Image: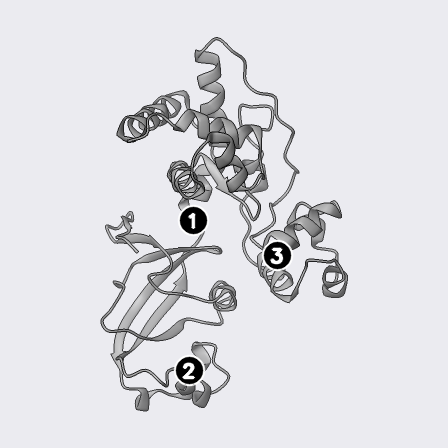
Amino acid sequence: MGGGRPSAGGLPVTNLPRMRIRPTELDAIVGGTLDLAFRRWDRPRLLVGTRMRTRVGLVEVTSLDRVDPDDLTEDDARRAGAASLEALRHGLADDDRPVFRVGLRFAGEDPRAVLRRTPPTPAEVGELQARLDRLDRASATGPWTAQALQLVDAHPERRAPELAAEAGRPTADFKRDVRKLKELGLTESLDIGYRLSARGEAVVDAARRAAGGRARRRAARPAGTPLPSIGAPATRALRAAGLATLEAVAGLSDAELLAMHGVGPIAVTRLRAALAGPQPDSRAQSAGPSATG
């Protein structure tokens, strides 16, 4: 992948997969039971201090050392989430590249999630519109930001290929551009499609008013903490049962969740990890100048 954006401390914030981390490992990092990973690489792929964006938030690299596989210990295996030292070494077999020990820690929520929940001031709306204008001017195919925002606004949770078809654009190009909007905190990626954030709604409504129109009336979002990323089938199953927030599923047992068609063990594990971990302030998620709040 390409280079990451600098963090507040000057080190990059990057998206996976510069280093691949399994979902169960991410959950363990958040829970504090895993703080090491071992990888065979030709050369170091990360810098100490790098923060990786993942589905659970930011994961920071706290150390990076080349090690001899023969020097690994049972404590290394435990901290890496391996069943045993033998299992750890077995997972590193069949590859003659150097072994690196990577220290990891959960570094908090993705700053973009905070941005998405934070309604912009009028001055910030102007700055965001200026950035959208620059994206439009830099596009070889012409202005696209207003159309993309309006499509996501009008069709939340609709699949990207359907939105791209309506825009008359290749799906890959449309998804790439929506990622640029996400970087500005204007859209949210869901297990099924996208939706505007409170920040995005404010920008779209400001553009409507500037054109002589009115702010769009939107259905209110469910009060509470949004579901984590659990996959489209599980998300559909929970929503069909009227369960759209973490608070709504908190009282269900694992057996009750697994009885729903589309909800599997991985989805249940992610729900339990989200319920056990620190949650963003749901009041901030529902705040905003538009009808959605």
Q: Quick check: 242 left or right of 101?
A: right
Give the amino acid type for the residue marked by disc 3 in the picture. Answer: Leu
- The image's mark for residue 91 is 2
Q: Disc 2 and disc 1: Cα gap in Å?
A: 30 Å
- Residue 98 position, x and y percent, is 26, 80
Q: N-terminal of the two: label 2 or label 3? A: 2
Q: N-terminal of the two: label 1 or label 3? A: 1
- Residue 253 position, x and y percent, is 74, 62
- Residue 29 position, x and y percent, is 46, 66
Label 1 neighbour load within 10 Å: few <14, some 14-19, many 20+: some
Q: Is residue 46 visible?
A: yes
Who's the residue at 28% across and 31% down the image?
140
Q: Secondary structure at mark 1?
A: loop
Q: Is residue 119 visible?
A: no
Q: Which residue has dot 3 on it? A: 275
- Residue 32 position, x and y percent, is 48, 68
Who's the residue at 54% across and 45% down the image?
190
Q: Measured along the vertical axis of the image, is residue 9 above or below residue 67?
A: above
Give the amino acid type for the residue marked by disc 2 in the picture. Answer: Gly
Q: Say if mark 2 contacts mark 3, CB within 8 Å.
A: no
User: In the picture, which quadrant includes the N terminus?
Assistant: bottom left
Q: N-terminal of the two: label 2 or label 1? A: 2
